Amino acid sequence: FYMYQKGTPQYEYHLKTYGGPEKFGYKDFIPMFTGEKFCAQEWADLFAKAGARFAGPVGEHHDGFSMWNTGLTRWNSYNMGPKRDVVSELEKAVREKGMKFMVALHHAENWRYFPHWVEGTDLSDPAYFDFYGRPHNLEWKDGIPQKGEWPIWNMQEKPDKAFCDLWLAKCKEVIDKFSPDMLWFDFGLGIMPDPYREEMLAYYYNRALEKNQDVVCTYKYQDLAVGSGVIDLELGRFDKMMYHEWITDTTVDDGEGWCYLFDAQYKKPVTLIQYLIDNVSKNGYLLLNVGPKPDGEIPEEARYILLEMGKWLQINGEAIYDTTPWRIYGEGPTQMKKSGMFSENEELHYTPEDIRFTVRDNILYASVLDWPENGKILIKSGCELFPGEVEKITMLGDGANLEWTLTEDGLRVTLPKHKPCDYAWVLKIERKAPF
């Protein structure tokens, strides 16, 4: 997008490196995209070791380049670039590891963000009329397209029927070919006409019903009817427990490139582990973006983060998987200043008083987000428990019975002398009928 916009750093870099978009357009990157080190089995193995319960690729981003062997466009990874059906390979590898398979679809955004209307580049050449997933019949006057295209600043222009038909056909093809357990949609879903969105969702759910398959569809803002899918917060989360399920998507690095950035600064494992715990305590999930290198290899910094999360989940996963929120999501002094979409840029520094809760059957899990120097904590929300309700308390990864007392101030617990893991320690509070 920005490589075509004069005055942006991306345009200046492209001009210096490749000679300008009129000489080297986005399409010319395709032969450089070979993914020679991509191995679906290695990716799936890494994601499984990270403790992921679902994983999958971007099926198509905002550029009209499909990552599967499609009969709907010649611009795809099977015919060009790596010449491999990336979605198919990952579908098999992910499911072999026992994970649910997801596909992210961003292609509705092609209408708004990849017109590339600069005269003399890409789409102004008849040879590339169908690039980016939308046909073009450009007529130019004074450097501005007059027909079949519109300037990038006109964000209200509605997509035409040909584009909507192609969008829907790609959705159906992905559903039919790969039976994804989860479909993730980006912002562009909201510009599609209601009948197209309704048909897509009905098609997805009806095909799943025929296969007795549980599936999930995500959406942003009000792009789908309330209750018809799971609300998605990009780079954000809620500051309180929600009655509906929701999901965050964030990245392993501190940037917002949603791709491999050679100069990126990566998040600390503790940050993402605390992020996961906080989401789950509020009825949320975490979708973590991992941008591979151009050759298809996962960066070492990302591998380290994923494996550290996996080590933590091996010990503490029972407080995360198949749990539900408690009547109170948590307690502590550290509060988010804002919540919702794009609220993530706030750095939170949790203390030993910051605790998050989840439940499973008769067990209450209390995740302590920082270790107290004196080895003791007071769970103020423990005053919600009744006399005689607590049977015993242990710490996941340790297993020894811990000393505790229940008072009007809350539940006081003496922690083990040695930490069983490096981040966020979980108390397992086993309960019985009170009194």
Image (cartoon, rainbow, N blue to C red):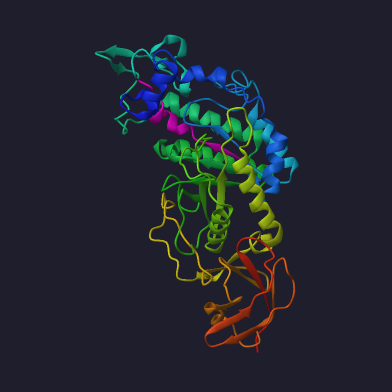
Residue 369 image position (x, y, % from top left): 56, 65
On screen, residue 343 versus residue 369, left or right, reads left
Instruction: Residue at the far top: name it.
Output: 126
Instruction: Residue at the far front: name it.
Output: 373
- The answer to whether residue 228 is magenta is no
Q: Image point 65% across, 85% down: which residue?
A: 434
Number of marks drawn: 0
Asked if residue 53 shows in the view, the reply is no
Q: Image point 39% across, 19% down: which residue?
A: 15
Foreground of the two, 338 or 233: 338
Quarter residue 11 falls in: top left
Image height check: is 144 above or below 409? above
Task: Check the picture and name the quadrant holding the N terminus.
Answer: top left
Foreground of the two, 333 or 435: 333
Instruction: Residue at the far left: name it.
Output: 142
Foreground of the two, 209 or 311: 311
Residue 261 image position (x, y, % from top left): 51, 35
Image height check: is 259 above or below 279? above
Residue 371 image position (x, y, % from top left): 58, 69
Q: Image point 74% across, 75% down: which residue?
A: 400
Asked if residue 345 shows in the view, the reply is yes
Quarter residue 313 falls in: bottom right
| Magenta residues, start to end | 102-117
Residue 245 image position (x, y, % from top left): 53, 57
Task: Check the picture and name the quadrant holding the C terminus.
Answer: bottom right
Image height check: is 281 above or below 413? above
